[in-house]
Amino acid sequence: MTSIFSKLIAGEIPSYKIAEDDHYYAFLDIQPLTVGHTLVVPKKEIDYIFDLDDSTYTGLQLFAKSVANQIKRAFPDKRIGVAVIGLEVPHAHIHLIPFIQVSEMNFSNPKLELTKDQFLEIAAKIKSA
């Protein structure tokens, strides 16, 4: 079964794209912990991150680093936290979460409710950074 992330990558479902290349895709999480919370995925649909072949795994990490640097430039007063949970969607992904206090990285926290315009503004801010 095709994951929701594969459908986002294929353009079947809209997303707030941050970055893309031939192998990886980054987009805003629509249930963010903080403003700028971004997901980074390989285009190859593999459920568990440690099942990725070495080349895809290292490429994903390097792509995530590049995206994290964009987010950092957009939100210079924040650190960029990294989390890999791997339970929500059966498609390997990395969470990049801008934060000031470690408590902001708690996935049990209530998710932000943002409007489409707010998501578009955040995506534009990161992409232009």
Image: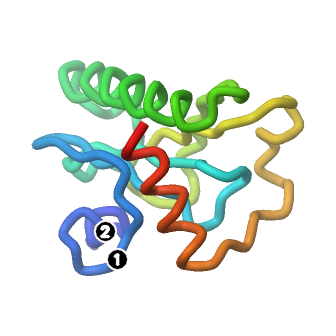
Could you tell me if the residues under marks 1 and 2 are in contact, i.e. CB atoms within 8 Å?
A: yes
Foreground residue, 32 or 90?
A: 32
Near mark 1 (Cα within 10 A), the count class, few <14, some 14-19 or many ≥20, is: few
Question: How many labels were placed on the picture?
Answer: 2
**Which of the marked residues, 1 or 2, is nearer the chain's N terminus?**
2
User: Residue 110, image x and y in percent?
Assistant: 84, 63
- At label 1, the amino acid type is Pro
Instruction: Using the image, determine if residue 90 lies above or below residue 62.
Output: below
Foreground residue, 70 or 12?
A: 70
In what quadrant of the picture does the C terminus appear? top left
Task: State how far apart marks 1 and 2 are (Cα).
Answer: 6 Å
Q: Which residue is mark 2?
A: 8
- At label 2, the amino acid type is Leu
User: Residue 37, image x and y in percent?
Assistant: 60, 49
Question: Of the numbered discs in the image, which one, if any, rests on residue 14?
Answer: 1
In what quadrant of the picture does the N terminus appear? bottom left
Foreground residue, 71 or 95?
A: 71
Residue at (48, 67) in percent of width and height: 120
Callout 1 secondary element: loop
Question: Of the numbered discs in the image, which one, if any, rests on residue 64?
Answer: none
Q: Quadrant of residue 84?
A: top right
Near mark 2 (Cα within 10 A), the count class, few <14, some 14-19 or many ≥20, is: some
Residue at (30, 46) in percent of width and height: 19
Instruction: Using the image, determine if residue 104 lies above or below residue 17.
Output: above
